[in-house]
Amino acid sequence: MDTEKESGVESCNLGKMEDLSNSDGNYDLGYQPSPSFVDQNDQSIPETPGYSTLSGESFVYGRTCSETSAFSDPIDDHSCCSEASTSHWPPTRSMAQNQAVLSRLGTKQQGNEDEKQLDYLESLELELEMMKDRFAKLLLGEDMSGTGKGVCTAVTISNAITNLYATVFGQNLRLEPLNPEKKALWKREMDCLLSVCDYIVEFTSKSQNLSNGTALEVMKSRPRSDIYVNLPALRKLDAMLIEILDSFEDREFWYAEDGSVSSNSSRTGSFRRVVKRNDEKWWVPVPCVPPCGLSEKASKHLRHKRDCANQIHKAAMAINSGVLAEMEIPDSYVASLPKSGRASIGESIYRFMLGTEKFCPDYLLDCLSVASEHEALELADSVEASMYTWRRKACIKHSKPSWGMVKELMSDVDLSDKNHILAERAESLLFALKQRYPELSQTSLDTCKIQHNRDVGQATLESYSRVLEGLAFNIVAWIEDVFFVDRAVTTQE
């Protein structure tokens, strides 16, 4: 027993000397040992399970002697460390407990991330199935029965864009932001339909120099010229129109339907009783303004957006007219042309176009006094048919070519020829008629071109520009309705 005690004392003394040497090293490093590690009698704390020696790491990561820790070793109550009270140690958790808590938190966060990732993958799968369904309809020409009775791909894309516009904007008859779901539907579906244009390319030669200095000409693909120019412009016009609608989130006017008062106005009643519009669009909601009228800020904002929408309408109409002009004239329309342009356009108009030295289409339209849009469309059809009849007669004197060569032969036509003069004046009259009636429906030739068109790129550009033209025109009309009501209310005061 004496031998065991002596060996225990020697081991304690060795531990004390070792601790003091470590503490001196820590003083050199700038560390200050805690008084809890050395008692006042300079008795050292022997190295026991659950305690660490006074090394540099022990000041930062000191494990406590905790009874609640399942990972710490049991301590003998009769050991030398019983003299050191556990109250000197900070009441912190064990490293194993911290790791367990962090592990549970990490598992929970990982579960949430997995759920989000799963939802995202499911949405992607739904969009992929939707795209498969859309492209299947495009390939089958809207005939899902498989009998081969579908229309061509160009007509299918044109119908798809037209139907999408009717779905998204058909019920939107007010100056207000578009529903977020419909806005997302419009963007997603249009991106799907317009992606077809990414594969309509043309090949051009490009010079390439090799490392040895040899120059070679290689063929490089690029988007077709009409798509390269018009499609980015149409996308920009689309974004501008959506931005115009979004700008009317906070507005001073509101809408009342069927003579009822809007829910957000208790100051005045509906102006359907006061302001009577002489039109047949009874389904369009009537705008209402405050009793004192619109403020100067609101009026300035409306004028600015009206001017922007008007410019967008002109740009979309120009693109649409250009695309339609490039489409081939169907043989069915050529076969239906009248033999005499004079009989098609009428005697009075024919004399006015031929008898005057200086032709003024606006003066002729004023004399005709077109009363309705239906009359304007009939006049446009007859003028357009007469124009192509006279052009065909002007070209037939040189040879009897196919209708596709008419444009090339027009440069060789005698400018003093009567048929050529009448064709040029009919074209200017048709242009003035479309400018005066911008809401005019498509003529018979335009409809025939769209139905018989086989060019997918032209069909996409034509339908996209047509729906944007209609949306821009509607925005201008809605703003004019607000100004009409505002003027009526201001006049009544």
Image (cartoon, helix red, strand yellow):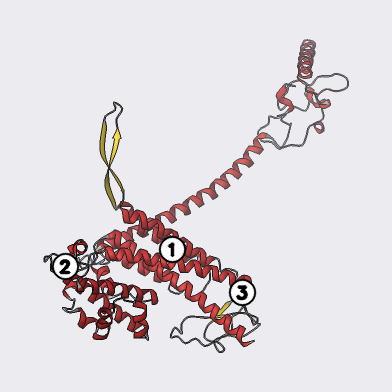
- Most extreme residue toward the right is 40
Earlier in the chain: of badge 3 and badge 1, it is 1
Q: Position of residue 313 (x, y in %)?
A: 43, 68
Q: Which marked residue is nearer to the observer: mark 2 or mark 3?
A: 2
Badge 3: how crowded within 10 Å, few (<14), some, or many (20+)?
Answer: some
* Residue 71 disc label: none
The answer to whether residue 170 is left or right of residue 72 is left
Q: Against 194, is 321 above or below?
A: below
How many angstroms separate mark 3 from mark 1 (CA)?
29 Å
User: Where is mark 1, residue-wise?
Assistant: 185
Q: Residue at x 34, y 77 (%)?
A: 361
Earlier in the chain: of badge 1 and badge 2, it is 1
* Residue 395 disc label: 2
**Kind of residue indicated by mark 3:** Glu
Q: Quadrant of the N terminus?
A: top right
Residue 437 shows in the view: no
